[in-house]
Image: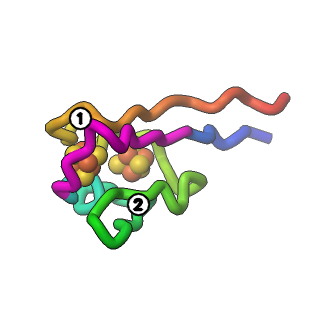
Amino acid sequence: MAEKKQYSVVVNESRCKRCGICIAFCPTKVFVPDAEGLPIVAYEEKCIGCMMCEHRCPDIAIKVGVKKSEL
Ligand code: SF4
Ligand code: SF4
């Protein structure tokens, strides 16, 4: 059985300027904005590792990585 890759998504709050680009581009809606527009990683398990958020973020405030397999 093939294991599905799991990704970690981390937003650097001090770098993020709350522009909403990552929220708009994420194809699987991993982020939910808080009251100030800061993207909260609400559904990390939905991340498909497309890197769109990391590449589009103008402030290099997002880091996407592969989680270690539990095997
Ligand atoms: S890597 Fe892709 S799927 Fe994962 S949070 Fe970023 S935009 Fe969404
Ligand atoms: S794209 Fe970057 S700066 Fe804009 S809201 Fe997302 S993390 Fe913040």
Q: Is mark 2 within 8 Å of ligand 1?
A: yes
Crowd around label 2: few <14 · some 14–19 · many ≥20 (10 Å) = many
Which of the numbered marks, if any, corresponds to residue 65? none
Crowd around label 1: few <14 · some 14–19 · many ≥20 (10 Å) = some
User: 19 or 26: which is nearer to us?
Assistant: 19
Upstream in sequence: badge 1 or badge 2: 2
Q: Quadrant of the C terminus?
A: top right
In the rendered image, which quarter is residue 30 located in?
bottom left
Was residue 10 drawn as part of the magenta stretch in this picture?
yes
Report which residue position mark 1 lands on: 55
In the rendered image, which quarter is residue 58 located in?
top left
Residue 31: image location, x then y, percent: 41, 60
User: 16 or 64: which is nearer to us?
Assistant: 16
Report which residue position mark 2 lands on: 31
Question: Mark 1 and mark 2: span between their CA atoms?
Answer: 15 Å
Compared with 16, 41 (above or below) is: below
Stretch in magenta: 8-19
Disc 2 element? strand
Please name the residue shown 19% across and 48% down the image.
17
Q: Please identify the dominant SS of the magenta region.
A: loop
Residue type marked 1:
His
- Indicate left or right for 5 with 27 as reference: right
Compared with 30, 71 (above or below) is: above
Please name the residue shown 62% across and 41% down the image.
6
Residue 55: image location, x then y, percent: 23, 35
Please name the residue shown 35% across and 37% down the image.
62
Compared with 66, 45 (above or below) is: below
In the displayed image of the protein, which residue is found farthest to the right? 71
